[in-house]
Image (tube, grey):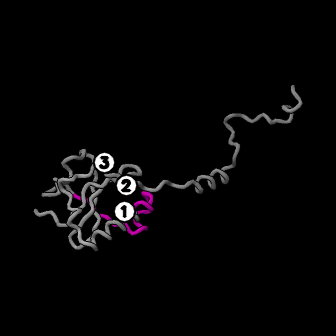
Amino acid sequence: MKNNQKNIPNVPHSKHLLNDHVALIRAKDEVEPKLKISFDYYNSNLCEIEDLQISPARKCLMKFKQIGQSTPKTLFENNVRSEPVRRTGRYLELFSKLSDDVDLFEIDIGSASRLFYFTVGYLVHVVSIKNSHFKY
């Protein structure tokens, strides 16, 4: 046996080298990634972004900022409130280029203005920005 190897303990492979308390501390310190905004599924045919007035446009930008500073777990506490969108009436147009398993949400950005999106992992996919309500 070489001189530098005689003091190394023989630890079985199944034995944890860190106690459970230390392992938990490390898990708590890991930072969850922030959400990223994507326009890959943006529906230009339904978009009314150029018609947004100053107040809804500013609110939309603030929501983008809040989304980008959030994780999936902190969206609500970062004041990003959304409602699910049902596949009915004129809202069906929003789903026209999306797969059947997508859950779409809307954020109120003005009296009638809405930001429509869905999430996959850490990506928030913007589908449309509307300046008016859909008519039934």
> Considering the numbered disc 1 on the image, is that residue within a helix, a strand or a loop?
helix
Residue drawn at (87%, 27%) of the image: 2
Q: Position of residue 55 (x, y in %)?
A: 28, 74
38, above or below 50, in the image: above
Kindly indicate whether the residue at mark 2 contacts the one at mark 1 (C-beta within 8 angstroms). Answer: yes
Name the residue tied to disc 1. Answer: 64
Q: Nearer the viewer, residue 135 or 41?
A: 41
* Distance CA(mark 2)–CA(mark 3): 9 Å
Q: Quadrant of the N terminus?
A: top right
Horizontally, residue 14 falls left or right of residue 88, namely: right
Write down the quadrant of residue 111 in the picture: bottom left
User: Which residue type carries mark 3?
Assistant: Asp
Q: Position of residue 8 (x, y in %)?
A: 82, 35
> Considering the numbered disc 3 on the image, is that residue within a helix, a strand or a loop?
loop
User: Which residue type carries mark 2?
Assistant: Ile
Horizontally, residue 112 falls left or right of residue 117, namely: left
Residue that sits furthest to the top in the current view: 1
Name the residue tied to disc 2. Answer: 37
Horizontally, residue 60 falls left or right of residue 52, namely: right
Earlier residue among tags 1 and 3: 3
Q: Position of residue 52 (x, y in %)?
A: 23, 68
Q: Quadrant of the C terminus?
A: bottom left
User: Which residue type carries mark 1?
Assistant: Phe
Q: Nearer the viewer, residue 56 or 106?
A: 56
Q: Is residue 21 magenta?
A: no
Instruction: Say which mark, if any, is on residue 135.
Output: none
Earlier residue among tags 1 and 2: 2
Give, as a single range, the part of the protein colored magenta.
67-85
Name the residue tied to disc 3. Answer: 40
Labels in figure, total: 3
Residue drawn at (22%, 63%) of the image: 50
Main SS, magenta region, reads loop
